Image: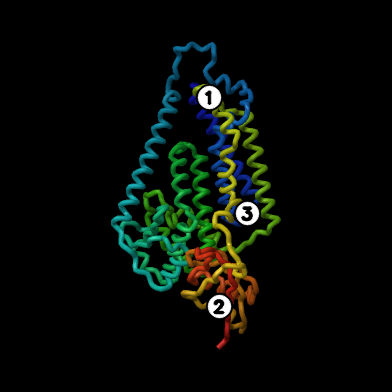
Amino acid sequence: MTPELVALVVYGAQLAVVVLATEAALQLTRPTSPSLRLRLWRAAWLLAWLLPFGNLLAPVPAAPAWLVSMGPAASRPAQVTEAGWLGLLVPVVVMGAGAHLAWLAVGLVRLRRLRRRSEPAMLDATQSSMVQAVAPHADVRWTDDVAQPVTFGNARPVVLLPRRLSQLDSESQLTVLCHELLHVRRRDWRWILLERATGALLWCHPAAWWLLGRLHLNREQAVDDAVVQRTGARRAYMEALMWFAGAPMPRVPAPAFIGRRHLHARLSHLAQERTMTRSRLVWTVAATLLLVGGLTTTIVMAVPLDLSKFSKPRRVVGPQLRRAPWAPLVEWALGSQSNQRHGRVYSSKEKGITLPSVVSEVKPSYTPAALEAKIAGDVLLAVVVKADGTVGDVAVAQSLDKTYGLDQAAFNAARLWKFKPGTREGTPVDVQVDLQMRFTLK
């Protein structure tokens, strides 16, 4: 084999081990949180791309005899060339990657065309409140060119809603809109572009597509949980998923609302309400990292990937990589810096802080079970009013009813409030305030 083909085979084996180890660890620990599963799969995805640089970070161990025999031996005449299909494998992989990247570029052009051919959506008051609460900078538009909702864009995010969405009831429409807005809020399109690009480069490897499929599924399940938490309309949302499941998926680099192959997994997840204790979360993360790290280290040591056989060595590369430039990316993917991304949150009691003022409010509604139980009183919420006037984090400071859903109803209503933001020295800042939601029986 040529050095290039040996490197391709070795990297393929290492990638397969990373994916299989991650899947085995998650099957063993069975974490119920899709957000946690997404972060673990994302860490595996980052690890897969760090594998080729492993020999630059540490000395390459001696390759086993069977692998050396596959490579070009010193006794082999220089004029001997690879014959048969093996000699064409590397060029085919490279050309396939180029074709997939070209298709990705065509998809970006299609998104731009879809945006130009769409028109601004006329939303009702509830839908407008949802946009302002979740992603006020999103541009919501109607289109006849797609059968499923499509969300894309970074600096100017766009939510394209198919006109057939109007055939659903208003509650289901609101859940669909919330789903797409949450993709904007989470900046998922950035990750999707990176995943599509890596999928194009690794188009011939089944493990790579399995990994990307897991990333997509867990991202959508995390958004599903957030939709239900924000709207409380679990049944209406599940009906919307089933209604869109039969529609053709858009052939563009953007998250599809639902595909048939993920319908069962997403509905099953929505039908189950599970929570993870802190001890189980720690056990899940530790077990996954130990298993994946141990197996990956073993395969890298047993089957090393030595890039120096077909690339010019540059001594300056080693010291640069030893500064660990990938560490911040890994920490970010695992969510360790999630709190820092939102900036400082000021207390309403701090000096120099001007309190936010209410611009629009949404009254909480009774649940049928709470009405039957005749529960009345107040729910006290700790609310972060962001610098743009929308509501950020919400926590229940004083509970009224955790059984029949009044705490959740107050939580959902608070997320839809709109404020004139608080200021510090004339500059809008994030301010935490107390918000009282009253439930009164008439």
Amino acid type indicated by mark 2: Thr
> On screen, 180 above or below 126?
above
Give whichever of 137, 104 is nearer the camera.
137
Secondary structure of the residue carrying tag 3 is: loop
- Give the residue at the far bottom of this rendering: 442
Q: CA distance from mark 2 to mark 1?
A: 67 Å
Task: Name the quarter where the C terminus is drawn.
Answer: bottom right
Residue contact between numbered discs 2 and 1, judged by CB atoms under 8 Å: no
Contact, CB < 8 Å: mark 3 with mark 2? no
Q: Residues within 10 Å of mark 1 (few under 14, many from 20)?
A: few
Indicate the colouring scheme: rainbow
Q: What residue would you read off at disc 1? A: 314
Say left or right for 286 vs 163.
right
Residue in view at x 47 percent, y 75 percent = 360
Work out whether mark 2 precedes mark 1 in sequence or the reverse, and give the earlier one: 1
Give the CA separation, mark 3 to mark 2.
30 Å
Mark 2 lies on residue: 367
